[in-house]
Amino acid sequence: MRMPPVDIHQTIDTIKHALRRPYSKHSPAALGAILQELHPSAIAFILDELDLPHALRAFEALPDEEAAEVLDEVSPTTNRYLISNSPRDRILRLLNILPMDDAAELLSEYGEEESQPLLATLAKSDSKQVHKLLAYPERTAGRLMTTRFARLSAKDTVSQALDYLKTNARELETINVVYVLGAREQFVGSCSIADLLTARPDIKVQSLISEQTPSVSLDTNQKDVAQLISQYDLLAIPVLEKSGRMMGIVTVDDVIDVLVEEFNEDIARIVGTDAEEMDQRTPAQVARMRLPWLLLTMLIELVAGLVVSRFDRVLRQVILLASFMPVISAISGNVGLQAAAIVVRGLDTGHISLVKWGRAVRKELSAAFLLALACGVSLGTVGGIWSHHAPFGVVVGVSMCCSMLTAGLMGTIFPMLSKRLGFDPAATAGPFETSFQDVVGFSVFLGLATLLVHWLK
């Protein structure tokens, strides 16, 4: 398999330099020579890094087989530009090269008015298949599946099965697993290519099938499909109607795409929104969605400011206290954000359940307690040495422990509470957690300092 160069950014610079030349002097063959050693995913990365007119020129230099794979890998923005500005007959060739599930996924990025002309140019049978896939809801097994799977009758012999695979292998999505169907295409079971190759040619396929093959329905969420394939170490999973009729398969390569997509969305959620909203909403809409939570956070932080203002006398008497307040706030905030990220990820993957919320709270509080003990002792020791007063170190250490425990508790509870109320847990958990731990941390810190002020001077 062709691998991208070690320094792909150097390759991007080389391509940009070549594309700066006037088009009349530019040789597509020379540009193709630069790209031919790259994997399609690496080429897609490069096209996304180029400005759109240059990306189109690089795309034009690719042979059709490679261009089809690249078209399936580039970002939606680049994809739209390439399709809109490439000759229609070439786009038709590329869509016919792509597997139907990939073609459906590509066309799903467009509205009905934009996709209909492209669908009309496909072969009648292919267009019909893509129409069927697009009819299923997004993020479901029906939208993700392909109908090009190896199918056999239970009455077929191993010899007939192998002949069928030899004849149709290039048209099928995969031949690693063969699916056995009964009357009216009812799913019976599956067998592997290894089973067929090692069995006697005259025996029936039915004797080789595994009846315990997991399956999913057409409306199964793509995330659940990915979890099943991972759980059972499958190369593909059958998709069935409620009646048991087999409609297609979801392959492991499509599942990897799902996992990457979900991972990217999880990362986007951590900073306060999700990938779909980032892609489809305008900056003003995204800001409007996040602003209420930030304003509520500001209100809670004003409470923390009020707490600090009530202790201005002790701060004037022991100015060193102010030096430790940002340390306590920052470390506690990090603990809370870590807890929130773990809980958000657990809720998203199913490892944390709202039904068993107490287990997650106990686990995170235990971890926060150990962290608070270690950090409290460390910061308290530093405070005692710095101030030359042991009571000062006690105040700092106890305050750190209380603030970190509060942050861990809030970072665990708020994501689950937000999920229960129907809000985005990542958008709400971080701001609320940091705000509440500031209020509690400053209150404990300055309250203890007031009680022990005669010992701190």
Image (cartoon, rainbow, N blue to C red):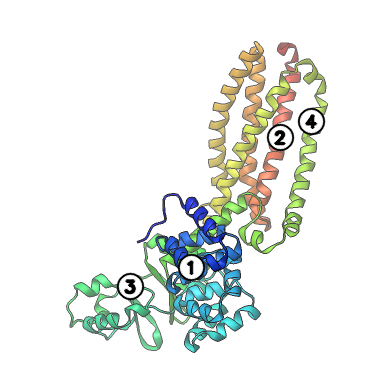
3 or 2: mark nearer the eye? 3
- Residue under label 4: 307
Determine whether label 3 and label 4 are within 8 Å by CB: no
Query: For the residue marked with disc 1, what is the amino acid?
Result: Pro
Q: Earlier in the sequence, mark 1 or mark 4?
A: 1
SS at mark 1 in the image: helix
Along the horizontal axis of the image, is 52 left or right of 199? right
Q: Is 158 above or below relative to 452?
A: below
Give the image location of residue 188, x and y in percent.
35, 79
What number is the disc on residue 28?
Answer: 1
Along the horizontal axis of the image, is 185 left or right of 322? left
Query: For the residue marked with disc 2, what is the amino acid?
Result: Asp
Which corner quadrant of the image does residue 206 belong to? Answer: bottom left
Q: Earlier in the sequence, mark 2 or mark 1?
A: 1
1 or 4: mark nearer the eye? 1
- Disc 3 to disc 1, C-alpha distance: 41 Å
Q: Around disc 3, counting alpha carbons within 10 Å, would you say few (fewer than 14), some (14 to 19), or many (20 or more)?
A: many
- Disc 1 to disc 4, C-alpha distance: 68 Å
- Residue under label 2: 438
**Quadrant of the frame with the N terminus:** bottom left
- Disc 4 to disc 2, C-alpha distance: 10 Å
